[in-house]
Image (cartoon, rainbow, N blue to C red):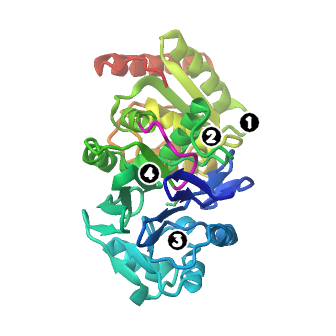
Amino acid sequence: MIPREIGPRIYSIGAVDWDRRIFDELIPLPDGTTYNAYLVKGNEKTALVDTVDPSMGGVLVENLRALGVKNLDYIVANHAEQDHSGALPQVLKLYPDAKVLASPKCKEMLVDLSLSPESRVLSVGDGEAISLGDKTLEFMHAPWVHWPETMLTYLRESEILFTCDLFGSHFASSDLYVSDEAAVYEAAKRYYAEIMMPFRTVIQKHLEKIKNLPISTIAPSHGPIYDKPNFIIEAYREWVSAPPSNLVVLPYVSMHGSTKEMVRYLAGCLVKRGIAVKQFDLARTDIGKLAMALVDAATIVIGSPTTLAGPHPNAAFAAYLVGILRPKLKFASAIGSYGWGGKMVEQIFGMISNLKVELIPPVVIRGYPKAEDYEALERLADAILSKHEEHRIVDRIT
Ligand code: FEO
């Protein structure tokens, strides 16, 4: 994208990746993404805040040239992941006097990951500031959003907080600022669910830390800039802190229809009892949608047939994913069908054993559901309802 001014001598100079459809060879990107980088020109010194994915290094360099940047004093690296630091070697080569400013941990990682020369990377402490003349950059260490080295950078005079991944969204757009709040909310929630959810507790602390900071603008490194920062701060507060909703997530896979029939019947039983359901066919679903549902759900019920004595690999993948995303679920169960036996449930429960969930007895049947199996599913729905009532789990807008 072309350079655009977001404040006096402050420019957005990153790249829009309209066509990228997967991140980390795992995360679907239905709306593409952006790699935002920002140029801050003080009356004495100039700093670049973050770079871009290596595939888009040319865009960044072109934008630096378009703005006539002859000398770059600093490159702030808020995060060492390659989509922000990958173009660092290219920029360092172009500006041989530029120094990289990073947290101590980030310094180590930049040397390891982007092969940046150690002598050109300076560590900055939490709370440390540098002057660009009439502009000041303050560094706030904010580890684990979502790597151990992450930090935020605050441009004091303009009250702009550069947050890199935190508050970001994979949302390609020519809009510099959020214009369609509903669309960006959806993309930011997806981003939170896939990237930030495992770090809920630490994010609560970071939100506390910035609570009293005057912020006019949040400039993340993915997606549109927030000129109304409360929009995303309040959304994050809700996602990290609000109690789970009266919602059951039902990811399932079915080879010959038995498990699917169980899911269909259980979903009806739950709805009849006033419990919302979101079900996902794991052979087809966008896992980002599943992750988003997990932001709010109180209960998960994983549905799987027995395949070669264990869960279907798609169900194993989902269970493993839920385990590592660590949503605020309170209860878990499983349902499924088998032909001649196996350890499907034990293996699924093993994969989510790190979650602080109470397990509700599963319903595992032989073959296609029969009258007594439907009754067992009714009892499972009763058990879920009674747990939700006991823990005062109520409907919330999700
Ligand atoms: Fe956008 Fe963690 O990189």
Of mark 1 and mark 4, the one earlier in the sequence is: 4
Q: Nearer the viewer, residue 18 or 333?
A: 18
Return the x and y of residue 355 as percentages of the image width and height: 36, 45
Is 262 contained in the magenta span?
Answer: no
Task: Choose mark 2 or mark 3, whichever is in front.
Answer: 3
Residue at 57% over, 32% down: 181
Label 1: element kind: loop
Of mark 2 and mark 3, the one earlier in the sequence is: 3
Whether the residue carrying mark 4 lies under 8 Å from ligand 1 is answered with no
Measure how far apart labels 2 and 3 are at the Cα level: 43 Å
Range covered by the magenta-colored residues:
221-229
Q: Nearer the viewer, residue 134 or 211?
A: 134
**Residue type at the position of mark 3:** Ser
Number of callouts: 4
Q: Quadrant of residue 327?
A: top left
Residue under numbered circle 1: 256
Label 2: element kind: loop
Residue under numbered circle 2: 305
Mark seen at residue 166:
4
Return the x and y of residue 301 as percentages of the image width and height: 50, 33
> Do callouts 2 and 1 mark residues in contact (Cβ within 8 Å)?
yes
Label 3: element kind: helix
Measure how far apart labels 3 and 4 are at the Cα level: 16 Å
